[in-house]
Amino acid sequence: MCGILAVLGCSDDSQAKRGRVLELSRRLKHRGPDWSGLYQRHDYYIAHQRLAIVDPASGDQPLYNEDKTIVVAVNGEIYNHEDLRRRLARHKFKTGSDCEVIAHLYEEYGEDFIDMLDGMFSFVLLDTHDNTFISARDAIGITPLYIGWALDGSVLISSELKGLNDECEHFEVFPPGYLYSSKTGGFKRWYNPPWFTEVVPSGSYDPIVLRRALEKAVIKRLMTDVPYGVLLSGGLDSSLVASIAARHLSGTKASRLWGTQLHSFSVGLEGSPDVKAAAEVAGCLGTIHHEFHFTVQDGIDAIEDVIYHIETYDVTTVRASTPMFLMARKIKSLGVKMVISGEGADEIFGGYLYFHKAPNKEEFHRETCRKVKALHLYDCLRANKSTSAWGVEARVPFLDKEFINVVMSIDPKLKMIDMGKNRIEKWILRKAFDDEDHPYLPKHILYRQKEQFSDGVGYSWIDGLKDHAKLHVTDKMMLNASHIFPHNTPLTKEAYYYRMIFERLFPQNAAILTVPGGASVACSTAKAIEWDAAWSNHLDPSGRAALGVHDSAYELDAGSNSSTIKIVEDGPMMMDTTVRELAIRS
Amino acid sequence: MCGILAVFGCVDCSQAKRARIIELSRRLRHRGPDWSGLHSEQDCYLAHQRLAIVDPASGDQPLYNEDKTIIVTVNGEIYNHKALREQLKSHSFNTGSDCEVIAHLYEEYGEDFVHMLDGMFSFVLLDTRDKSYIAARDAIGITPLYIGWGLDGSVWFASEMKALSDDCEQFMTFLPGHIYSSKTGGLRRWYNPTWYSERIPSTPYDPLVLRHAFEKAVIKRLMTDVPFGVLLSGGLDSSLVAAVASRHLIDSEAYCQWGSQLHTFCIGLKGSPDLVAAREVADYLGTRHHEFYFTVQEGIDALEEVIYHIETYDVTTIRASTPMFLMSRKIKSLGVKMVLSGEGSDEIFGGYLYFHKAPNKEELHEETCRKIKALHLYDCLRANKSTSAWGLEARVPFLDKEFINVAMSIDPKWKMIKRDIGRIEKWVLRNAFDDDEKPYLPKHILYRQKEQFSDGVGYSWIDGLKDHANKEVTDSMLTNANFVYPENTPATKEAYYYRKIFEKFFPKNAARLTVPGGPSVACSTAKAVEWDASWSKNLDPSGRAALGVHTAAY
């Protein structure tokens, strides 16, 4: 990843302003530790902090067209840049950077080229012919982007909130899939796939089509000139990514440069479920596997830093980001700059445990659409910012545009969980990779249910966080929470604690509004809470609470003759509980 | 390099204090991007930010003795750690880190072990058995260290000033070669070599002894588990480092892991003298050479950050640090974590051009002693902090303790510059590596006079800086400079400009006092300004001003 910051039309071209822009840009240095660049033309400033992944030697940014009339700063990767270059045969390219095509595409097609880009990206482009600019963000919001407006009439655009929050009167999240044009002064959605309307599709399920689509998505993400690896939690999604990458590595340019053996990384408290599961998968795939252990204290000590980096007070995101943040530092220290990660599968396929309770296929489908649209506020934000904090880039093949189209056109009745037919969550994905001749994964891994992320790193992690929050937040503070924080009022001490840290770092009201809120159970949207009457009484944002839907719980259900969902707030974990799990609290 | 921060005896042991220490420690994270650790014990905190060079897998800090009663946080490299481990047979070690020996040495010898360490280091050690602690800094001050005192009675130690300046009422540079012990509450010098007294030595010059001492110094610095390289400006000092390193690479541990071709790095404005000179040396040695270019604008844009990192307003240091700072970022982006660099030779051998005017061998020798003692405020500070800003470690073989002993025991008459018999500056060093059978360097490089650093990166660099400062600083500002800055009053607009930036980051009086001042010409000490009557009227801290002594001027 890189960091971009643009200050456009601020009516100030002084040395002092230049100094200030440099200072703001430095706040994004973690994203692009390798080099920085600042383009200034009158009162237009475009700054860039670079992480060099493709063409480290010459691809420093900002980038230009041939006569330098068009200037562009990009954070991202354009996987189809070689194709696009071929289509721009009459253009002369100065660098090997994948992002340079953007300047030339604009020259050729004006503002209507964004959909031609296959990748993840945020960029700002200045056309010096008429001093207009455009800015755009990728379809799903894999890369972060914020936009703000200052009292002097300038527009600021920044990869992270911290680059612009102190300068702007108002700022907000730049919506994914949108283009901002200074000519119209407004946003336009450029991303218009069929699934966006949320109409329920009726496409058939072809396991091989699905498989090929994911394989293609992984393979194109092996484009790199630097060492890389795979984040492996041992669950289905990351294991599939690792398996495909390991299988196709040998044909790639990356393998010539960095060897044919894949590196994989996992993190957890000592002895945690993820660490065990990942080691098993790594053993099957024969990767060079790196395990990182952290202690609850390590995690707690990092919380402030995590919130500073990820810029959210969402409880689930903070919980899950911390181990990822710690792991990213270790990964970077090994010299690895890029990792492939499994985010997005749970949203596209309805993989969260609460999907067990989806009442019908229409509801199921619409919930997956809502989840995909909100990804940029949750898992995309986590994956990108936790890794970018240390100059590591995360690539997410499940959020490939083509792959999403394939998956979201499948009749959702096939995604529905049907324990009677042995169809657990994400069954169509599992089935697509169930190859008897050349198995991608052993069956028991392919069909295993896994902990949700923050549980998987070790059961005591979340308990430790809660205990720590109690030391900082008193009952009296909680009583006044709704007055102090009228928007997205924290309901738990843990949430209050994160919120306090967030507001200290980002005190503006606009910053508070960039973080989503609302009721949720086990990562659901507010809408899906209606699926089960019991849920609204037991709101807990984390995976653990949605008990009774995991395999092991179904078995217990049969024994206890109970059919209602059980929600255990502070109980032990799903997998190895026997006694307390039956304690239904209502 | 790593970053250390330690606080002892603060009144407050709350969660909030812990969080504050973590926050302060994060200010040193650039020094140690790879991991961080914090040990807290009642009202004592030892924090560490690690750059993993030796034993990346298990050497996270703080480090402990066997029963964890002794805790130590170290920034540095102990080159003789294996030999020391041998001497500590009865001890069992938890990690492969070179720094772990410190905990065990303390256990064995108490406070009197610092001189046994061969390397560069700053460390803080807590003995939980009697709640006493010590801190020490290497002989010359290759690694930075500051000490401070809080109003609550706490004592602070930090690798960089920025970690303690906001929380201490008073602080200062921790003197190199000293140890602080909480038992006595004071600093004591542990480094007592013969040359320190500044008495004139009389050992005759033996080229081979000098050569071998330097080769040993370079070889021991090849101890690394990560990719490394050499900073090569094309001058004598860095070229010798590169020549010796590439010759001995094949016998080193590093060779097995990272290949037999040495990486070398050079930076300059396009077409600058250094780039040309370094390329020539790299071609001769067959290194894998990387050239980096910067523009004057890029350098100017980086100034604030440079001053924040190097924590000085000394003009020469800032001029020379900026290119080094920019280059370090590029080097790090290639995955290289450690570089060897040529600092220290000019001080030991009297290599600065103003040494041409040394009136006699006594004056020359005393000046070299003064220069070495001040290195920690100038070139050591520059080399360490410019590279550490990007998590890159600089090792300086010329400042090897043994090598200094050898070089400083030579009768200084040999170091005197005598053009009539062909002895230019640093002749004793050049001659030591003048090997006709297996030449280290071609003769014309071995005997060439080079630009001083900030000139070598390109002549327009310093002019660009001056022009920029002229825009930022008005005449009336300079007129009032002695009222605004009564101490170390800036005499030029450039100096005024740097000072302004420095004071913005480090507003306390104590911070100002950590930076040396006084008259200087072309890097001389104030004392040496007396060598030439015309100098005192023409004070300019940079190399170019001392004209008339370069061969071109002869």
Image (cartoon, helix red, strand yellow):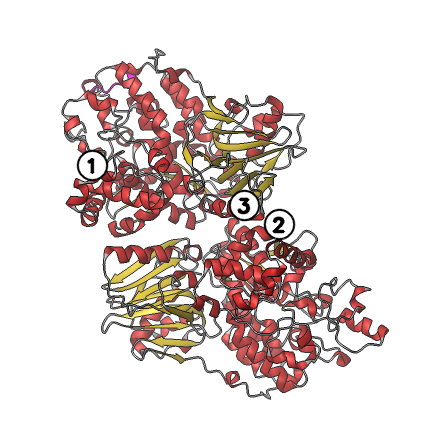
Residue pictured at 73% horizontal, 63% vertical: A573
Which residue carries the number 3 mark? B17
The label number, if any, that marks residue A297 in the structure image: 2
Local packing at callout 1 (Cα closer than 10 Å; few below 14, some 14-19, many 20+) is some
Residue pictured at 39% horizontal, 48% vertical: B329
Report how far apart the C-alphas of labels 2 and 3 lie in the structure.
15 Å
Q: Are marks 2 and 3 in contact (CB under 8 Å)?
A: no
Q: Is residue B69 left or right of residue B354?
A: right
Residue A47 found in image quarter: bottom left
Secondary structure under badge 3? Answer: helix
Which residue carries the number 1 mark? B491
| Chain letter belonging to callout 2 | A
Amino acid at the residue labelled 3: Lys
Amino acid at the residue labelled 1: Ala
The range drawn in magenta is: B414-418
Residue pictured at 53% horizontal, 83% vertical: A195
In the foreground, A278 or B175: B175
Amino acid at the residue labelled 2: Gln
- Is residue A109 shown above or below A40? below
| Chain letter belonging to callout 1 | B
Q: Is residue B141 left or right of residue A522?
A: left
Local packing at callout 3 (Cα closer than 10 Å; few below 14, some 14-19, many 20+) is some
Q: Is residue B57 left or right of residue A283?
A: left
- Is residue A91 shown above or below A323? below
Q: Are marks 1 and 2 in contact (CB under 8 Å)?
A: no
